[in-house]
Image (cartoon, rainbow, N blue to C red):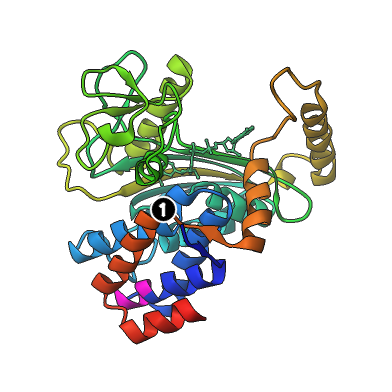
Amino acid sequence: MPTVPSDTLHRLTKAICRAVGSSEREAALVADHLVAANLAGHDSHGVGMLPLYVQSWSEGRLKPNQHAEVVGGKGPILVIDGHHGFGQAIAFEAMELGMAKAREEGAAITALRNSFHIGRIGYWSELCAEKGFASMHYVNVVDNNPIVAMYGAAEPVISTNPYSAAMPGRDGSPMVLLDMATSKIAMGKARVAHNKGTPVPDGSLIDGEGRPTLDPGCMFPERTGALVAMGDHKGSGLALICELFAGALTGGRTLQPEHPRSGGAVNNMLSIIIDPGAINDVEATTREAEAMVKAAKGAKVRDGFDQILLPGEPEAIQRALRSEKGVDVDETSWQEILAAAGTAGVRSDDMEAILQH
Ligand SMILES: NC(=O)c1ccc[n+]([C@@H]2O[C@H](COP(=O)([O-])OP(=O)(O)OC[C@H]3O[C@@H](n4cnc5c(N)ncnc54)[C@H](O)[C@@H]3O)[C@@H](O)[C@H]2O)c1
């Protein structure tokens, strides 16, 4: 398994995006996001997405150099179309627009529709927290077939519909950052398990007959099984709310069966961005939140646990480790990324220079 320095992954991602026609800025935004996902430990949403992006570009479903366009809204609401552009650039622009609106109004709601894959949703919470905003984000995934079975169902009707929320801290990093798929595991985690030949966690998959299984082989290369919604009936309910808020409220699309499935990975996202200073004295809010977080972290630890980790801490730990030692990329993913670079048109001498650097 190659261990690749993050700056090599960054250069490689930029070269692939430039080869499919992205501007320098767009290529840098995609590379910043994907490599940050790898550094946070989420390989499922890192550079391993590049083969899908290149394939979608070659099929005309992912369009380079699009921009987040405000197409409607009222008061604090901005309705934004992503025109099937690179989600890492589209959602970045949507968040910039949302934060500018929240500065004026005290809060903003961005209804982003029709963006190609927007990656790791926690990145958007982090971006808001960096500028002092609290935020929450409801996301759905359309254009592809459903892959997640709701509580009690033997077949999928929705997707992995991620949810993220963050409380801003003092230093520009979030005090707490929750970022999760509403399926028990993200699809990318099943892909990574399949590539590594390892089982998935208990209770995260059902096979084609609706029976629990540990084998990610029921999802690749042909999907016969389904991921299971997290948290039984409660997680299943949140997954459906993500589908409705992101898919219906934004004016995008849900995964209801009448829509065509063209095979892409289009995300819609409803984001709520709040300026804490519009509600209360920021110092008082921060002190109150810090006291609560300290109590949560300091609670007596249960048998079988070493410590209490708060949402966002596993990613911070991984970031510290991986920034130092590089990112382990499984051999299958690595070969697929190199093949995608070839398909995109990265020249072999450029490729050699990137990898030797
Ligand atoms: N763009 C899309 O369509 C899409 C779809 C699904 C998921 N995703 C992304 O996939 C990524 C992975 O999602 P996931 O659900 O597999 O994440 P995960 O299960 O690894 O983590 C979920 C949350 O739990 C926290 N956490 C993890 N381990 C913990 C522990 N031991 N103690 C306390 N807290 C802990 C994490 O900090 C995180 O906030 C996310 O970044 C998500 O945004 C994107």
Residue 335 in picture, x, y percent from top left: 33, 62
Dominant secondary structure of the residues highlighted in magenta in the image? helix
In reply to whether residue 23 is colored magenta, the answer given is no
Which residue shows up at 44% across the image and 51% down it? Answer: 45
* Whole-percent x, y for residue 125 in the image: 58, 48
Q: Secondary structure at mark 1?
A: loop
Determine whether, in the image, residue 119 is placed left or right of residue 96.
Answer: left
Relative to 321, 346 lies left or right: left
Query: In this rendering, does residue 171 appear at all?
Result: yes
Q: Estimate how packed mark 1 is, as few (under 14), some (14 to 19) or many (20 or more) residues with alpha carbons within 10 Å.
A: many
Residue 98 spot, x, y in % from top left: 53, 54
Residue 180, relative to residue 52: is it above or below? above
Q: Is residue 85 visible?
A: no
Residue 110 vertical position relative to residue 185 in the rendered view, above or below: below
Q: Quadrant of residue 336?
A: bottom left
Residue holding disc 1? 118
The magenta segment is 16-20
Tell me the kind of residue under disc 1: Ile
Place of residue 209 in the rendered image (x, y in percent of width and height, measured from the top left): 21, 18
55 over 44 or under it: above or below: below
Answer yes or no: disc 1 within 8 Å of ligand 1: yes
Residue 121 vertical position relative to residue 301 in the rendered view, above or below: below
Query: 228 or 292, which lies in front?
Result: 228
Q: Is residue 18 magenta?
A: yes
Q: Quadrant of residue 185?
A: top left
What residue is rendered at 58% in x and 62% in y? 326
